[in-house]
């Protein structure tokens, strides 16, 4: 279990990235949602012990991350948003190098694990190619493979589906569901649908704070029967309604809004989604500041 209490981090330029943040994550898939600048990457870097918080407590399975960072790193797999590679090393050679750094010293075991990860990430045919020459999607798959080296108990993935085509994204989804059964996987992404499909737990961040967290289905349930939608021209919403989204579906305007009830025949009751809860939380936060 990951437990975070009153976590604070302010950067030298005065940016308050994390503000009294509290979070509890059980084993399984845990999703982090929030707009740009919400503090998701700052939180993940802090958990990965790449930066020290100004204050607060962090523990993972009894390990104090501030006092025992090396102990946590031995159990960590991390895929940041961007990562560099040695320019002339092949995919297999880089995985070999990283596996040794992670303590996978037995050669046969190391090679077996690398072969399995190459297969899982669909990189077997490119194992002897330089990673520096990989496409964006291939490099992202390599990043996922290296994060899984050493059978980590905690895996941190920051925007892991960036650059992946639909088939690769689906392959990654299947992989993550499989590996998350006996460990904690923290998934940060802008794709709300990914988190709704994959994560049994979720937290929504804004301005360095957790707005809401908990069981994904439990967060959606209170909106059921209170989300409405209308197709076509922009419609006048009921008084006190909260507009959740205004998008296009096959070229036709689609408005979704939150309201206790609607008497207008043009408005249809819709099945609530995690994206609805996400937009509602952000809108209510904006209104509270006005």
Image (spheres, rainbow, N blue to C red):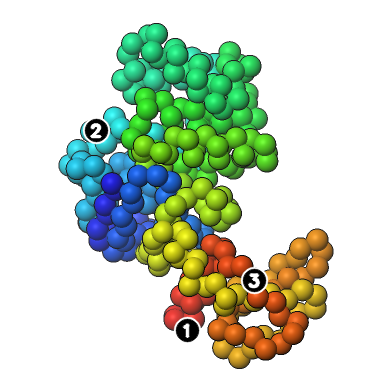
How far separated are the C-alphas under marks 1 and 2?
Answer: 45 Å
How far separated are the C-alphas under marks 3 and 1?
Answer: 29 Å
Tell me, yes or no, if residue 62 can be seen here: yes
Mark 3 and mark 1 lie on one chain; the one further toward the N terminus is 3
Residue of label 1: 290
Q: Is residue 177 left or right of residue 107?
A: right
Position above or below: 58 against 241: above
Q: Mark 3 packing: few (<14 Cα in 10 Å), some, or many (20+)?
A: some
Q: Which element type, helix, strand or loop, lies under badge 2? A: helix
Residue 180, given in percent of the width and then of the height, sits at 42, 39
Residue 169, given in percent of the width and then of the height, sits at 61, 39
Q: Is residue 30 left or right of residue 5?
A: right
Asked if the residue under mark 1 is in contact with the one under mark 3, i.e. CB atoms within 8 Å, the reply is: no
Residue of label 2: 70
Mark 3 and mark 2 lie on one chain; the one further toward the N terminus is 2
Question: Which residue extends farthest bottom?
Answer: 239
Residue of label 3: 270
Residue occupying image coordinates x 27% and y 58%:
7
Q: Which element type, helix, strand or loop, lies under badge 1? A: loop
């Amino acid at each position: 279990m990951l437990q975070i209490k009153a976590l604070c981090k302010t950067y030298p330029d005065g940016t308050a990235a994390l503000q009294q943040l509290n979070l509890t994550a059980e084993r399984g898939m845990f999703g982090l949602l929030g707009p740009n600048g919400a503090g998701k990457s700052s939180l993940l870097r802090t958990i990965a012990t790449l930066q020290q918080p100004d204050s607060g407590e962090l523990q993972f399975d009894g390990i104090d991350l501030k006092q025992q960072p090396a102990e946590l790193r031995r159990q960590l797999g991390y895929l940041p948003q961007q990562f560099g590679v040695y320019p002339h090393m092949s995919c297999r050679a880089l995985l070999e190098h990283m596996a040794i750094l992670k303590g996978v010293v037995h050669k046969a075991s190391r090679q077996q694990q690398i072969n399995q990860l190459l297969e899982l990430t669909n990189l077997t045919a490119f194992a002897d190619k330089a990673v520096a020459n990989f496409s964006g999607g291939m490099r992202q798959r390599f990043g996922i493979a290296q994060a899984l080296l050493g059978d980590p108990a905690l895996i941190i993935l920051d925007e892991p589906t960036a650059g992946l085509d639909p088939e690769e994204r689906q392959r990654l989804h299947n992989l993550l569901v499989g590996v998350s059964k006996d460990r904690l996987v923290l998934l940060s992404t802008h794709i709300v649908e990914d988190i709704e499909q994959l994560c049994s737990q979720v937290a929504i961040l804004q301005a360095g704070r957790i707005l809401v967290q908990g069981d994904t289905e439990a967060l959606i349930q209170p909106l059921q029967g209170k989300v409405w939608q209308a197709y076509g021209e922009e419609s006048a919403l009921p008084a006190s309604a909260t507009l959740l989204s205004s998008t296009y579906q096959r070229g036709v305007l689609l408005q979704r809004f939150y309201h206790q009830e609607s008497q207008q025949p043009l408005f249809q009751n819709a099945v609530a989604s995690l994206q609805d809860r996400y937009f509602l939380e952000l809108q209510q936060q904006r209104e509270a500041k006005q």
